[in-house]
Image: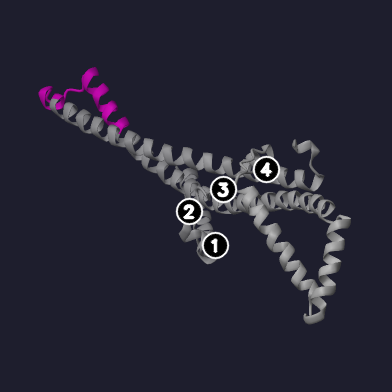
Amino acid sequence: MSTTALPKYINDKLQALRDARAVHDKNYQALTEVITGIARCHQQKKDTEVESHEAESQWRTLFRKLRGEMTPELQAQHHSRISKRELAKEFDGLVEEMELDKIQLHLDCGRSAPEVVAAHEAALTTFAEHAMSKAVDALSAALISPDVIKACALAKQAYSVYGDDPMKVIEQRLLGALSYRIRSATSLQNIEHPVLNDIGLTKPEETGVLPELQNSPMRRMQVATELKTKRQRLQQQGAAS
């Protein structure tokens, strides 16, 4: 069964799931890139600091050797050590900004991940209900035959002599037999279906979500306020420099 053959309300649920996944995948991909970038900046800062110490040592050695005479070579080494020192400081500022981006993306994932779970549940249960509706229609057509009706009518009369609710007894007998047959038959079935493959049969993992934020609306609001304040401070520092 292709998705085009499904009712519109099911296709709408499937599209809502795809849209929710696309939004969350974008948030989580951005979070992954920021985390990778932070780790890279820390390593580059460490490498720069090592180079800065080496440049500082080389400059001081040459400075003393030349008795302070600022030759082109000494001036070049002076500029090199200053630039490396400043570069290490720039990494600090960049990491600070990226840490704010990381927290913001954790908040974004905290919104988009539950939406994926909700859309997944809606799509999966709606499709299951659609399949069951078709199964009930087919089952009703197969069971409600003249022979079944006649047998149930006879049983109803017989049970009514000593029983208070003959239809309850009949329903229990029929449902019991039907339940057993269905369990036995479905245990042997391993049906691949494109719609189920599209939806997925496992609950989506809420990637990028921080439990300490997800479980506390008050904490999320506090973090969002802190982020706004820190970004404003960084912007003011950037404008001042």
The residue wearing badge 1 is 221
Q: Amino acid at mark 3?
A: Thr
Query: Is residue 27 in the magenta section?
Result: no
Q: Amino acid at mark 4?
A: Asp
Prevailing secondary structure of the magenta residues: helix
SS for callout 1: helix
The residue wearing badge 2 is 230
Per the model, the C-alpha gap separating discs 4 and 2 is 32 Å
Locate residue 152, reporting x and y percent: 83, 65
The residue wearing badge 3 is 202
Q: Where is the N terminus found, in terms of image quarters?
A: top right
Q: Which one is in front in this view, the residue at disc 1 or the one at disc 4?
A: 4
Towards the viewer: 227 or 131: 131
Q: Which one is in front in this view, the residue at disc 3 or the one at disc 1?
A: 3
SS for callout 4: helix
Locate residue 44, reporting x and y percent: 33, 33
Quadrant position of residue 27: top right
Q: Which one is in front in this view, the residue at disc 3 or the one at disc 2?
A: 3
Please report whichever mark, 4 or 2, sits nearer to the chain's N-terminal start: 4
Q: Amino acid at mark 2?
A: Lys
